[in-house]
């Protein structure tokens, strides 16, 4: 996945997570799932960023 696509996905997932949390709670299952996906995207971003430095 290209860097710009990952960044775009991160922003979309962050926005989705915040909206879900505001409508329900931070303990809501869907908020937690969105948070997990956001973590995965952030990890992908870090891996790609490191590989570009090498």
Image: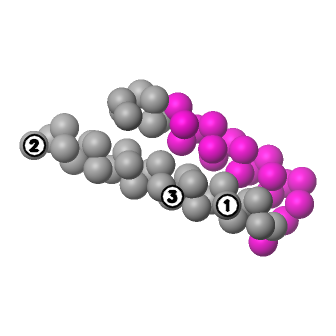
Circle 1 residue: 33
User: Which sits earlier in the primary sequence, circle 1 or circle 3?
Assistant: 1
Secondary structure predominantly adopted by residues drawn in magenta: helix
If the image is split into quadrants, where does the N terminus sit? top left
Circle 2 residue: 54
Q: Residue at x 37, y 45 (%)?
A: 45
Q: Are marks 2 and 1 in contact (CB under 8 Å)?
A: no
Where residue 50 sits in the image (x, y, percent)?
Answer: 21, 47
SS state under label 2: loop
* Residue 16 on the magenta span: yes
Q: Answer left or right for 6 relative to 25.
A: left
Where residue 3 sits in the image (x, y, percent)?
Answer: 36, 32
Q: Nearer the viewer, mark 2 or mark 1?
A: 1
Q: Answer left or right for 34 relative to 49.
A: right
Label total for image: 3
Q: Residue furthest left?
A: 54
Query: Residue 35: which quarter of the image?
Result: bottom right
Give the extent of the magenta segment.
Answer: 8-27
What number is the disc on residue 39? Answer: 3
Query: Residue 24: which quarter of the image?
Result: bottom right
Residue 26 seen: no
């Amino acid at each position: 996945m290209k860097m710009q696509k990952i960044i775009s996905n991160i922003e979309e997932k962050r926005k989705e997570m915040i909206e879900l949390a505001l409508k329900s709670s931070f303990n809501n299952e869907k908020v937690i799932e969105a948070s997990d996906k956001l973590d995965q995207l952030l990890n992908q971003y870090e891996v790609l960023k490191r590989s570009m430095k090498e």
